Amino acid sequence: MKNAQRQLPKSSLAERTNDLLKNKTSKTIIEVATDHFVKFGYRKASIAEIALASGVGKGSVYLHFENKEDLLMSCLVSEKLTLLEKLKEIDKHQEPDQLFNYLQIVLNFSLKAPLSKALLSRHSEFVSFVKNVPDNVKYEQEIFSEYLKEQLIHPLNPNLDNDQLNTIKAALEFIFLAVAHLPDLAFTSSNPELLETETIDTLALLLCKGITNNK
């Protein structure tokens, strides 16, 4: 039987964005805006140009989104919904494999999610947005961070004290950031996708072994 404590934390932001994606107009705006933010960053992004490319009037954008900040947040959450759906699958695996699968999924997301990658690797283009991230967003990030620590890391090595758990959690989050900063041409080979997969799998395996063997 699955442990209820293993369930991923619920996200009010995810629920709102899910509702937006059910509407054809707001879904189109999110898809177009995501590409626009990736290309131009936050400061140079134009609601008027996003509306034009979406085939709607500027007023339609504001009908669904309060402002440019709200639109970017919805784009980011929309992108992360794919991550959340994949993370739901980790509960189907046995305990020793759950952290490995979590790391595989998050590392792949860090490497390939275009908007999240742009936000992390081109910080100067999004700095005004980052400074104004709402407290509820930071709180939800903290909840997921605690989930990683308490539900995935600690069961693998119950001997770790809280300081050690926090250090490992911080190290993993640093690695996720580092992967997001990798340039698009980091993997050069005849089959770059295969090399990416093998690299991520190896990194996830090494991290799991290090956590399990940490005394």
Image (tube, rainbow, N blue to C red):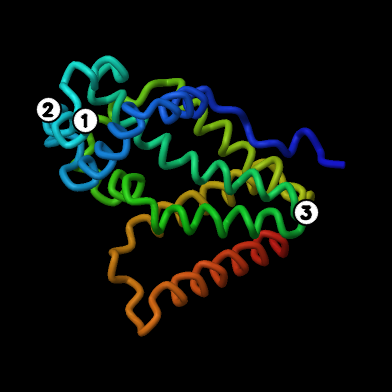
| Residue drawn at x 21%, y 30% as measured from the top left | 128
Camera-side residue: 44 or 211?
A: 44
Q: Tell me if residue 203 comes above or below residue 190 in the rendering.
A: above
Q: Residues within 10 Å of mark 1 (few under 14, many from 20)?
A: few
Mark-to-mark CA distance, 2 and 3: 49 Å
Q: Position of residue 210 (x, y in %)?
A: 64, 65
Ranked by sequence position, the earlier of labels 1 and 3 is 3
| Residue drawn at x 62%, y 31% as measured from the top left | 9
Q: Tell me if residue 63 comes above or below residue 133 in the rendering.
A: above
Q: Amino acid at mark 1?
A: Ser
Mark-to-mark CA distance, 1 and 2: 19 Å
Ranked by sequence position, the earlier of labels 2 and 3 is 2
Q: Residue furthest right?
A: 1
Identify the secondary structure beneath mark 2: helix
Relative placement, left or right, of 13 versus 34 is right
In the picture, the disc for residue 128 is 1
- For disc 3, the marked residue is 95
Task: Give the foreground label among 1 and 3.
Answer: 3
Q: Amino acid at mark 2?
A: Ala
Identify the secondary structure beneath mark 1: helix
Relative placement, left or right, of 105 versus 119 is right
Disc tally is 3
